[in-house]
Amino acid sequence: MVSDEIIILEPSQLSASFTAYDPSCIGNNDGYIELNVIGGTAPYLYGWNGNYLDFPLLAGLTDGEYEIMVSDSNNCFVNLGTVFLTENPVDCIRIPNAFTPNGDGPNDTWIIENIELFPSAYIYVYNRWGQELWRGRPGDEWDGYFNGKLVPVGTYLYIINLYEGTPPYTGTVTVVH
């Protein structure tokens, strides 16, 4: 009579947890969710709202709801439910109120910080008579020139329309030589 001992091993139960990080300011896409998985059989797939990655960091997230799921190579899965990310109620856009287009390097152009987060935006600059001096898009910087000439020292009106259902930003920027 022949006898063999057989040991059947199976992985421990698949389980996961997460840590969520909210977007840093209004309109930003720097929120992320870190996932930690134990058990199951690697490699794992990490999913949110029907998208899947093989890396446990779901990045580039905006304000919103994310349905999180993890699966292993045996098609076992764990649903972590809905994770809510809420943007920090701080304005992302920073608009300088002055610049010095004098060719010395620092502050030679009017740079609106984080405007690139709003790719549909338009930026307008007007003189005190309502004449448009400059029109720009995210990534553009006003150099203080109009029709090839440096504008006079003074205060100019700007309107920044994000075209995202929010009121436009309005204010003044001062040009100092």
Image (tube, rainbow, N blue to C red):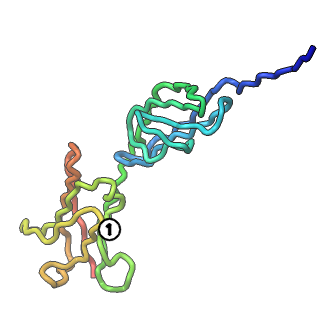
Rendered position, 19 above or below 163: above
Q: Is residue 49 above or below residue 175?
A: above
If the image is split into quadrants, where does the C terminus sit?
bottom left
- Of all residues shown, which one is farthest toward the right? 1
Q: Quadrant of residue 148?
A: bottom left
Instruction: Give the secondary structure at mark 1.
Output: loop
In the figure, 128 relative to 32: above or below?
Answer: below
**Is residue 96 or residue 114 the one in the foreground?**
114
Q: Which of the 4 image quarters holds residue 141?
A: bottom left
Who is closer to the viewer here, 98 or 48?
48
Assign the N terminus to one quadrant of the image.
Answer: top right
Q: Percent from the top left, x then y, of residue 34?
A: 56, 40
Q: Is residue 45 left or right of residue 12?
A: left
Residue in the image at 18% along x and 58% along y: 159
Question: Camera-side residue: 11 or 173?
Answer: 11
Using the image, determine if residue 75 lies above or below residue 140. Answer: above
Residue at the image point whose x is 83% and y is 21% from the top: 6
Which residue is found at the position 41% from the left and 40% from the top?
Answer: 87
What amino acid type is highlighted by mark number 1? Ile
Task: From the viewer's side, name the closer residue of 5 and 156.
Answer: 5
Q: Pointer 1: what residue?
A: 111
In the picture, measured across the screen, residue 124 lies left or right of residue 26, that is left
Q: Position of residue 111 (x, y in %)?
A: 32, 68
Horizontal and vertical percent for residue 81?
Answer: 49, 25
Q: Residue at x 29, y 53 (%)?
A: 118
